[in-house]
Amino acid sequence: MNFSSKLLEDAVNEFSKLPGVGQKTALRLVLHLLNKEQEEVDTFGNSIIRLRKDIKHCSICHNISDLPICGICSSNKREKEIICVVEDTRDVMAVENTSQYFGVYHVLGGLISPMDGIGPSDLFIDSLVQRVATTPVKEVILALSATMEGDTTLFYLYKRLKDFQIPITTIARGIAFGGELEYADEITLGRSIVTRVPYVNSITK
């Protein structure tokens, strides 16, 4: 792609580094910004800078937050004895959109994937075990994607938590194998949360 401006080329190259954004889409986005008022572009740019500079992760559940403790963990309306374990913030948003869950969360920050060099120590698993060991917990819901990595992580978490003698459940498989949680429609995901089942039932004996 030939550019008439080095500034334009640099901006397009940066936008094209975003997931799912090719050079043509990046060019369209950059040209769109060039047609905006300076104040609008400044607001856009500053929001990205502030996001990276000021964003925090909840000290309890590791979800993205504006404050040291997120709004869900600090809310008196949530059932703090029920913890829903998810891969990342996108999954928290997906479950919240169902309006079927009123407990709290624990964000792992990924899934166990030996092929990608991601092991248990790379995730927030120890802090989950610590939460279960030190706070009153009635149930842990393992709400992970129905993928090979998700199932590997489910089994590992079950082994780490089973001795605490609390119910460990998993969302019902209304989601096809290989499906990412964030892409499930709200009704299907909501039903999967409501009709969750003991994880031990899914283990081949």
Image (cartoon, rainbow, N blue to C red):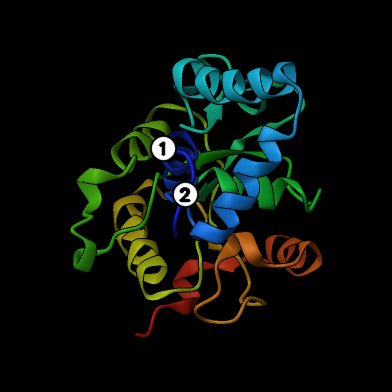
Q: Nearer the viewer, residue 38 or 135?
A: 38
Helix, strand or loop under label 1: helix
Please say if the residues under marks 2 and 1 sit with CB atoms less than 8 Å apart. Answer: yes
Helix, strand or loop under label 2: loop
Q: Quadrant of the C terminus?
A: bottom left
Q: Quadrant of residue 125?
A: top left
Q: Residue at x 58, y 23 (%)?
A: 45
> What is the x, y in percent for residue 146?
50, 73
Q: Nearer the viewer, residue 204 or 102?
A: 102
> What is the x, y in percent for residue 129?
34, 39
Q: Name the disc covering residue 3, or none.
A: 2
Q: Residue at x 35, y 68 (%)?
A: 149
What amino acid does circle 2 point to?
Answer: Phe
> What is the x, y in percent for residue 25?
59, 57
What amino acid does circle 1 point to?
Answer: Lys
Q: Nearer the viewer, residue 33 or 72?
A: 33
Q: Residue at x 56, y 24 (%)?
A: 65
Q: CA distance from mark 2 to mark 1?
A: 7 Å
